[in-house]
Amino acid sequence: MMKNTLGLVGALCVLLFAACDGKDGYDSRLDGMWQMVDTSIYYSFQVNVVNVKKVNGGSYFGHYRYENDSIYITIRNSTKQAVEPLGLKDTIQNFEVETLTHKRLVLRSEDTRLTFRKY
């Protein structure tokens, strides 16, 4: 009897831990790699890490936060001059998420509009 109870409690704990993935407020539609339309620039979003890269032009990592139809991107260990060719005005940039579907992403800030396709 005791053995069955311990087995049941163990199975219940495994199910509870599997249900907790640590992604509160996380929108999986943003997850993955996006190609900026008509360029060789790629933005890859994974949970809260962003990788921005240009084919044959460098790769930059940082963090992002997505909430209330806005995305806040911070690129680490870089400069404004390095990230400008990647569609960013500076190493810290905020965008309004204008469109987010499983195929298309449009980010907009004051004078910048970035359009992506899911890659």
Image: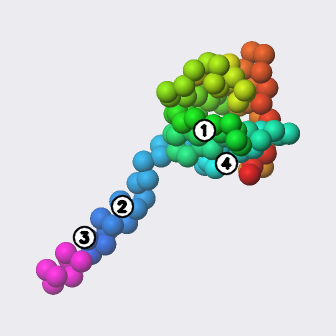
Question: Which residue is label 2 attached to?
Answer: 16
Residue type beneath disc 1: Ser
Residue at position x 54%, y 25% from top?
78
| Alpha carbon separation for disc pair 2 and 1 | 38 Å
Residue type beneath disc 2: Leu
Query: Which residues fall within the magenta stretch?
Result: 1-7
Q: Is residue 98 or residue 83 the one in the foreground?
A: 83
| Alpha carbon separation for disc pair 4 and 3 | 40 Å
Residue type beneath disc 4: Met
**Between discs 4 and 2, the one toward the N terminus:** 2
Q: Quadrant of the N terminus?
A: bottom left
**Between discs 2 and 1, the one toward the N terminus:** 2
Taking the view exactly as shown, the residue that stands out farthest to the right is 38
Q: Where on the picture, by quarter, is residue 92?
A: top right
Residue type beneath disc 3: Val
Residue at position x 26%, y 71% from top?
10
